[in-house]
Amino acid sequence: MFFLLRRLPDGDVELTRYGRGGAGRLEATGVETIAAAGLPTRVAELEGEASPRWVWDDTPRWYPRLLDAGVTVARCVDLRLVHAILRRSTAAPGFPRGGSAPGPWDVGQAVPGESDGLFEVVPESLPDPAGEFHAQREAVESSPTRGRLELLVTAESTGALIAAEMRHRGIPWSARVHDELLTSALGPRPTPGERPARMRAALDEVRRALDAPDLNPDSPAELIKALNRSGVLVQSTRQWELQRHDHPSIGPLLAYKKMQRLLVANGWTWLDAWVCGGRFRPDYVPGGVVTGRWATSGGGALQLPRAVRGAVVADPGWKLVVADASQLEPRILTGLSGDRAMARAGSGDLYEGIVASGAVATRAEAKVAMLGAMYGATQGDSGRLVPRLARRFPDAMALVETAARTGEVGGVVDTLLGRSSPRPSDDPGADDAGVGDAGAGALPPEMGVRPADRDARAWGRFTRNFVVQGTAAEWALCWMGALRRRLQARWGTDARAPHFVFFLHDEVVVHAPADVADEVAVLVAASAVEAGRLLFGDSPVAFPVTVAVVDDYSQAK
């Protein structure tokens, strides 16, 4: 049963019930008006009575208010997220397609209280949610691959619930430990406008080595000029290019740049802005990347450096259950291609299995070769090793090669469940703003990948990886959805129940009372198996997870 919520002009909420009528068609079976103040109570009542699937225009607009009132829902349909999938999906041919003029539903997430310009905040209300809901259901139910598409839109909407719940709960964070870590890495907190002591010391070494006493190291143009003048011929200040040179300035310069990144991304200013009451509450953006991966609109939760992970500290009497899906994308490629030789190699450590197959000599070569295959490397070590993989694992390599050729001629590729890639003409900025780490520019030139320049080969490298990364995102959503269901069935949703606090592509962190943490770890692994079966059925591909029960996040690595 579906319950659609729509906010009325006076602030009250209209609830429409939907059931199956003649010929199984979806029909409205009742309407009621609920006072805004009474919505959490009514939702809680109906959640217990009917086990509905709540339908709303945008999860961040509705769910946080329910969570603040202590109400958790099991299932929802996020119309905005589902619209984004169906609008482009080749599995929904009857739905408005990519390339048509954007409409009011083609907007970004409603981020509570802010927008950094990357994601357009939705208007106060989206028009005709009932009409949009009917159009979406018709598209899904008439899809030639309905089962897969249904799983995708369900998993995407469940991900939106999890994102809101994680923000509500927050990541347990020790400001004291964070300050200690920063002091150890950078020196004591400086006065505003000053550099920390260790950064100043590294900068002094750089200036002496380059004979540039007034050098501004934060100006790339000025730094390149000073390096070239000292015989260090570089065209950029990227780490991989600097490391090629043997000069007294390089060591302290790299140290300075590392400290600068930490200071800017997660320094004391970040700590003051983002950690309150012992919690870090980032704004997650489900589906924020075109492959389906998540993004964030503030706080940088998906880029927490190792230097500050020790500040993620479990509450007294609690533990962090940290789970990492091992070699996820290569295993997804195995499942997609049905490559039995690669499945046999992945029965244990996949990279060791590739070595045992005779394709390469070392585990390091196996990893480099697999990255090259998925990202389209043609030069360097990756380019040299990829043909060896093709001889041993022809089905897997054929899948990514076919995806690349499709992209090169402007075609569309699909994930397993039905998320479709954009065409270059559909999204002029997609390879810059949306592709992210799926694009060809994600690897440095020594891996054999030149920066994406929007030519056919660059787009082919994008589509090559899209099918793998996008399906991996689907697996991760199914993993989290299965784990959420198991946790809530076992312990409920009250304040003492284990709950998600962090998610990063192929890694989840659950905050759990210490006396049940080991049981949570078992459920984490079981949920990974369930996700694999949901996507690949009885395929022999395995999805092992490494699980650690720790007191702080740094102990899991």
Image (cartoon, grey):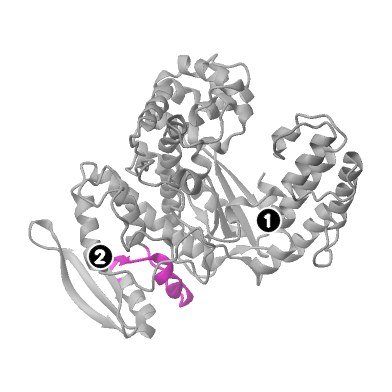
CA neighbours of label 2 inside 10 A, class few (<14), some (14 to 19), many (20+): many
- Coordinates of residue 89 in the picture (x, y in percent): 30, 45
Label 2: element kind: strand
In the picture, residue 263 is in which quadrant? bottom right
Q: Up-down: is 357 above or below 121?
A: above
Give the magenta range: 49-74
Comparing 243 with 291, the one in front is 243
In the picture, residue 244 is in which quadrant? top right
Mark 2: amino acid: Phe
- Coordinates of residue 204 in the picture (x, y in percent): 90, 48
* Magenta-span inclusion, residue 136: no
Q: List the residue tagged with mark 2.
A: 2
Q: Up-down: is 43 above or below 260?
A: below
- Coordinates of residue 223 in the picture (x, y in percent): 78, 44
Q: Decide if residue 350 is in sight here.
A: no
- Coordinates of residue 521 in the picture (x, y in percent): 54, 49
Instruction: Tell me the quadrant of the picture where the N terminus can be found.
Output: bottom left
Q: List the residue tagged with mark 1.
A: 265
Please name which of the two marks, 2 or 1, marks the residue nearer to the observer.
Answer: 1
Mark 2 and mark 1: Cα distance apart in space = 42 Å
Mark 1: amino acid: Ala
Disc with the residue nearer the chain's start (2 vs 1): 2
Comparing 360 with 264, the one in front is 264
CA neighbours of label 1 inside 10 A, class few (<14), some (14 to 19), many (20+): some
Label 1: element kind: helix
Q: Is residue 471 left or right of residue 310?
A: left
Comparing 436 with 26, the one in front is 436
At 28% across and 51% down in the image, what residue appears? 100
